[in-house]
Amino acid sequence: MSFLFILFVEPAFEKILDEYNKITEEMSLEGFGHVSRGAGSGFAGDIAKLGKRQSELQPVADKIRSYGARLRELEENKKLLDDGDAEIKSMALDEARRLEAEILSLRLEIEEALLPRDANDDKNVIVEIRAGAGGDESTLFAAEIFRAYGKFAEGLGFKPHIVSSSRSDAGGFKEVIFEIHGRASAEKHPYQIFKYESGVHRVQRVPETEKSGRVHTSTITVAVLPILEEEDYAIADKDLKIEATTSSGHGGQSVNTTYSAVRIVHLPTGITAQCQDERSFTQNKEKAMEVIRARVASHFEEIENKKVRDLTKSQIGTGDRSEKIRTYNFPQDRVTDHRINQNFNQISLIMEGEFGGITEALQKADLLAKKEALKK
C-alpha cells in the first residue's frame, strides 16, 4: 500500500484493507496446504472460511479504495482553486463540490458497513407461526401470514420448506413450522431479512362468519430462529431423547404404520421438536435436530439477555416473542409496526408477500439505533 494512500485513509479503514489484502494474497498462493496450517499469516482455517471472509470484506474494501481515490483527487483539485484564471477556478470549485459530496456519501456507506453486525445474519432460518387468541380466525390468519412469508421469500430468491404443521378444523394452521433457505453466495440471507418478524402479530377485521359485521381482534405469534450447524451449537447426545413415531394427520389420527416420524426431547429443558413431513426417519431426524438445536440455543440466549442488557445492542428486532410488534387493520387498510411507529397502506399487497417496504424501514431504524448506541 502506498504512503500517499495511507495519508488519506483513517486507521480503521486501513485495517480493513490490510486484512482483505492479506486474505487475497493467501487465496492466491499455489500451495493451499500453506493456508490450512496458517503458516506465518495469522489466518487459521480452511479455504472456505477465508473465501467467505474475503466475500464479506470485498464490498467495503472497494468502497474504501474509492474513498481514498476521491480524497486524492480533492487534494489535487485544491491546487486549481488558487489559479488566477477565473474560468479554471470556477470549474475547480464545481469539481470540489462534486468530490466532497461523493466523499461524504462513501464515508457514510463505509461507516454503516463497519457497524457491529448480527453474527447470525448469514444464516438460513426456521420460522414458527402459532395461532394465539381468536380461535378459528387466528388459525386462518396464521395460514395467510405463512402464505405471505412464502411469497416474500420466493421473491427474494429464497426457498421455503415446511418442517411440520397442524391444521385447524377451519382450514387454517394451529401451528406451522418451516425453513427458509438462501444461497450462500447471495448478498441477502434469510435471517437478516426475517429476523424482524419475531413477536406477536395482531389482526383486526370482520371474519367471514361474522354476520353482524363486527370487527374481531385475533393474534398469532411468530418466532424466527437461525438454523445452526452442529459446529455452531452442539448438544450432547445424553441430553437428547429421540423417539420414532407414526405420522399423524388432521385430528391426530395415524396416517401410516411406519415409524418414520421423529420426536426429540431436550431433557435438561423439556424443549421438544418433531418432524413427520419428510419421507424417511433419517430425513425427519435431521430436520427435527435443526429445530431442537435452534430452540435450545434461543432458550439460553433469552436467559442471558434477561440477565444482562447490552446497552450497545439495537432494540429493533430483538425477537422478544411476547412483544406486540405489528397490527394488521383490514377495515382501515393499514399495517402498523409498533416498534418504529410507522404505518403502511395497501394491506392486500402486503398479504401477497410485499413486505419489502416494512423490512427496509425496520433495517433503517435498526441502523440508526446502532449508530446512536455507539455514541454512548
Image (cartoon, grey):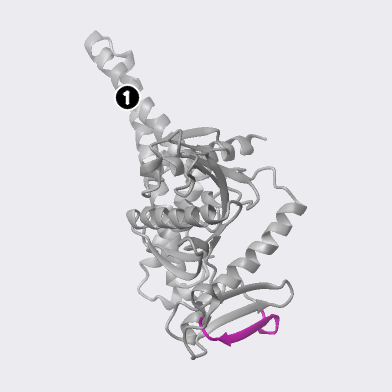
At 52% from the left and 89% from the top, the residue drawn is 259
Q: Which residues are magenta?
A: 236-247
48 or 334: nearer the eye? Answer: 334
* Residue 111 visible in the shown view: no
* In the foreground, 251 or 8: 251
Quick one: quadrant of the C terminus?
A: top right
Q: Secondary structure at mark 1?
A: helix
Q: Does the stretch in magenta take in 107?
A: no
Asked whether 244 falls inside the magenta stretch, the response is yes
Q: Residue furthest front?
A: 211
Residue 274 place in picture, x, y as percent: 56, 76
Label 1 CA crowd tier, 10 Å (few <14, some 14–19, many 20+): few
Figure check: 306 above or below 101: below
Please determine whether, in this image, residue 272 is positioned above or below residue 375: below
Residue under the point 52% across and 79% down: 248
What residue would you read off at disc 1?
98
Q: Residue furthest right?
A: 307
Q: Position of residue 115 (x, y in %)?
A: 54, 44
